[in-house]
Image (tube, grey):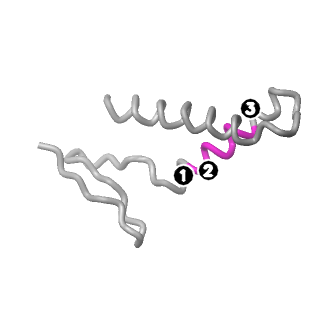
Amino acid sequence: MKKQIDRKSNGDKSESSTGARSMTSDSALELIRARAYSVFESRGRQPGHALDDWLQAEREILRQSSASEDL
């Protein structure tokens, strides 16, 4: 049985019965920001693709997070 604590506005994090904590939304946003900037740089720093870069980074980070939680 998996113990789940919902993330609340006071900063609580999800916790499994093993005590492992999932990624907080703040840490996820920071990872997405960093990855989006990396995508922007790899694109040659061309303006006009900020949303595409962000969405690509978001997919990659959330996919990685989901895969690590499945372990």
Residue 6: x %, y % from top left: 29, 59
Mark 2 in CB contact with mark 3 (< 8 angstroms)? no
The secondary structure that dominates the magenta segment is helix
From the viewer's perspective, is 57 left or right of 26?
right
Secondary-structure class at tag 3: helix
Q: Which residue is mark 1?
A: 27
Going 87% across and 34% down the picture, which residue do you hit? 45
Give the alpha-carbon distance from disc 2 to disc 3, as whole Å.
14 Å
Magenta-highlighted residues: 29-37
Res 31 → quadrant: top right
The circle drawn on residue 30 is 2
Query: Residue 32 magenta-drawn?
Result: yes
Q: Quadrant of the N terminus?
A: top left
The three-letter code of the residue at mark 1 reads Ser
Q: Nearer the viewer, mark 1 or mark 3?
A: 3
**Dot placed on the residue nearer the N-terminal end, 2 or 3:** 2
From the viewer's perspective, is 8 left or right of 64?
left
Going 35% across and 35% down the picture, which residue do you hit? 69
Residue 41: x %, y % from top left: 82, 33
Q: Which residue is mark 3?
A: 39
The extreme bottom residue here reads 10
Characterize the local packing of mark 1: few (<14), some (14-19) or many (20 or more) Cα atoms within 10 angstroms: few
The three-letter code of the residue at mark 2 reads Glu
Is 2 located above or below residue 71 in the figure?
Answer: below
